[in-house]
Image: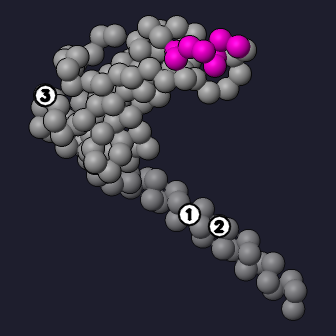
Amino acid sequence: MSSRFTIPDNEVEISPICAQGSGGQNVNKVSNAVHLRFDIRASSLPEDVRERLLTLSDQRISKDGVVIIKAQEFRSLEGNRAEAMRRLHELIDSVAVLPKRRRPTKPTWNSVKKRLDTKTRRASIKAGRARQLE
């Protein structure tokens, strides 16, 4: 779990829940799945990272700015807890780095010429077909 940011344990609320799906008799008795809740606005993340997280259109982020992650992949509580934290770090890291700004470019003179020549050639082929119909 190497992340750019360290998240204090008091900012993350992890609660065990019963897992869904098949799993035999054990799934009904043991709470091995995990619900992770992380309030973005109350976190100690840098302001720009918080803003990018809040503007992210991700279904795991509620309207109130709370990240909710459900992990039920593993049979152990610790495995699911680690998986939920990994997903949270992955989400934060995805907005931590700004994407490079695209520099608008112009098509080359030769590519424009080729495109127009191809269009002219295609137009003459189609015009030749029209004359044959008459």
Residue 125: where, in percent of width, then height? 73, 71
Judged left or right of residue 77, residue 98 is left
Element class at badge 3: loop
Q: Which mark is residue 44?
A: 3
Element class at badge 2: helix
Dot in front, 1 or 3: 3
Q: Residue furthest bottom?
A: 134
Q: Is residue 27 above or below residue 99?
A: above
Give neighbour class at mark 1: few <14, some 14-19, many 20+ (Cα, 10 Å).
few
The residue under the point 38% across, 17% down is 86
Q: Which mark is residue 121?
A: 2
Element class at badge 1: helix
Visual colour scheme: one colour
Residue 32: where, in percent of width, then height? 52, 15
Q: Residue furthest right?
A: 133
Give neighbour class at mark 2: few <14, some 14-19, many 20+ (Cα, 10 Å).
few
CB within 8 Å, label 2 to label 1: yes
Residue at numbered disc 1: 117
Amino acid beneath label 2: Arg
Q: Which residues are magenta?
A: 25-32
Amino acid beneath label 3: Ser
Q: Is residue 54 magenta?
A: no
Residue nearest the viewer, comparing 118 with 87? 87
Give neighbour class at mark 3: few <14, some 14-19, many 20+ (Cα, 10 Å).
some
Amino acid beneath label 1: Asp
